[in-house]
Image (cartoon, grey):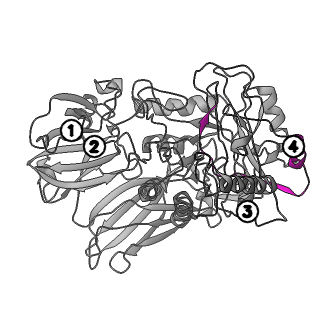
Amino acid sequence: MPSSAAHDIPRPEHPRPQLVRADWLNLNGQWQFEIDAADSGLERGLRERELAATITVPFAPESELSGLGHTDFMEAVWYRRTVTIPPAWAGRRTLLHFGAVDHDATVWVNGVEVARHRGGFSPFTADLSDVARPGEDATIVVRARDPRHGPQARGKQSTRYGNYECLYTRTTGIWQTVWLEPVPDVHLRRPRITPEVAASAFTVVTPLSANRPGTSVRVTVSDGNGPVATATARADVDLTPSLRLQLPEDRVRLWEPGEGFLYDVRIELLDAGGAVTDAVDSYAGLRSIAIDGKRVLINGRPVFQRLVLDQGYYPDGLMTAPTDAALLRDIELAMAAGFNGARLHQKVFEERFLHHADRLGYLVWGEFGDWGAFDGREQQPTASFVTQWLEVLERDHSHPSIIGWCPLNETSQVIGDQVTQLDDVTRGMFLATKLADPTRPVIDASGYSHRVPETDIYDSHNYEQEPAAFAGQVRGLDRDRPYVNTAGDRPVPRPAVLRQRVRRHLVEPRAGRHRPGRGPRRLLGLRSARARRGGVPRPLRRADRCAAGRPGHVRLLLHAAHRRLPGGERHLPLRPHGQARRRARPRGPVAAGRRRTLTRRRRRRLVPMVAVQRRRGHRGALAEPFLSVLSDHHAEPLTW
């Protein structure tokens, strides 16, 4: 983009620093805009007419920087802008790029649909060659649908009107840079640059738009002193040419935590006569990742990761940083505070952030914004979660700052006898990640939600806010005894023991009057309808409590349904797997015998317990319930 135009638009910097061409046109700035409250705009002709308002792209309409600050729900929004494709691009194809649009996007140019994409975190591209040529006007119309209900990868976006707990103002529509780029008919696509520290080499995989006879790909790696290594490969034999560049021993310099040394990488596409027909500039860092027991090794040395949990929200731009300098400042502040990296939490950060992390040697874990799949009973992630995550892996593979992947976070759900949708998607995302990138460790689902036994790292989450208590919980680190999530007094087992899983829930009570004598500190036994007095379960009998501590028992978490305690806290009354909700009590002599049989079965097989305890030091009396069911492992298998 001409530098003279850069000061006229917001976020003028190149949005894709690992794949830069000399010619491009930033489309950030003023666009026509209109809210489509009922998603009826296509029927009402919004695609064809001028829109009622304006908006500053790339900021979402909920943000102040967009010029709107509309924070209510919007089922759909529309954008419109007419641009002239530069005449100097004649003879090349014009690509229209979107960094991210939340959530379901459809794009028309000059009345013709050119792209549709699902997912609010990953980029997509439309080829405009058949609808607008260089020197012609292109009227771009974008509709973004963002339904409030149903499973959707939202990350930390609130499904209520206002912010609550750890969920924040929504982002709808375009929230990253939009730009045009000219490319030849046969052009380079995003390369995959993989470092090999043991061999002092880089492997560069160069996807192409097409193969043509006589073409070749040339890759040059340079440092501040000039070219370091060059390799050439034919581009008319293999569908995707791959090159290996060996670095001379005296020019090897590693990318280290706190010192992000980067090599410049130039990739060129040559025709049969050796002329350059396409060229892109990129960069790479030479670093390795390995695991030795409980230690993560960077370049063969253990590195203790002091990571900040970065959620990437800005007061005025929401998920979009107001400036490139704001991205850099977040990293510099974290490093000044003593952190050496970040877990990029429930959001796929824009590439400019990763670029600064690459330059500064800032360690990051890449994570998908998967929250939004819980329907009130169970997790329902869809196939699009896998699709979007693969697009993210393709975009970010070559960033040396990323040292691990985390597809899912705290997708806590009971593991029962039936294979669930969450089981399928969790394993699918884990396997897809390992296949797409075998060079980095993968956490299947962070926190107390592991479902894949072969996950590379088993992590635990700790929400303790008292420094002294936290220090006590993690003091075993230096003795190779890390903190492990527990339920009650039992550790949450490792994923190899999935059938003996217990999970912990953190819930925030709603406001409500608390009646004395029915407080959350009581131990409540949930057994039969006859054991309930006035709707409140009676405490467990002494025999039941003794049985709970008997050797040879394991803890199992059964299916549960949310119920509210009188004081506003929630607990999860348990019922055996497959048992329906409680119905009206049957009456009559036959029914009475049936009730006695059910009661005997429950007394013999199950002793459900729910303990709800208030956590000290939290406003609103944050409740932290844990749930467990005791079952004799000699009586029957542990799977239900």
Closer to the N terminus: mark 2 or mark 4? 2
Query: How far across and how far down the image is residue 631, in percent?
Result: 80, 56
- Residue 571 in which image quadrant: top right
Q: Quadrant of the N terminus?
A: top left
Circle 3 sits on which residue? Answer: 496
**Gap in Å between the C-alphas at discs 4 and 3?**
29 Å
Please state if 49 lies on the left or on the right of 430 as rendered.
left
- Closest to the camera, between mark 2 and mark 4, is 4
Closer to the N terminus: mark 3 or mark 2? 2
Q: Residue at x 26, y 72 (%)?
A: 271
Mark 2 and mark 1 residues within 8 Å of each other at the beta carbon: yes
Residue span colored magenta: 541-565
Does the magenta portion include 371? no
Does the magenta portion include 547? yes
**At label 1, which amino acid type do we have?**
Tyr
Q: Please tell me whether residue 583 is drawn above or below residue 29 in the rendered image.
A: below
Tag of residue 545: 4
Circle 1 sits on which residue? Answer: 79
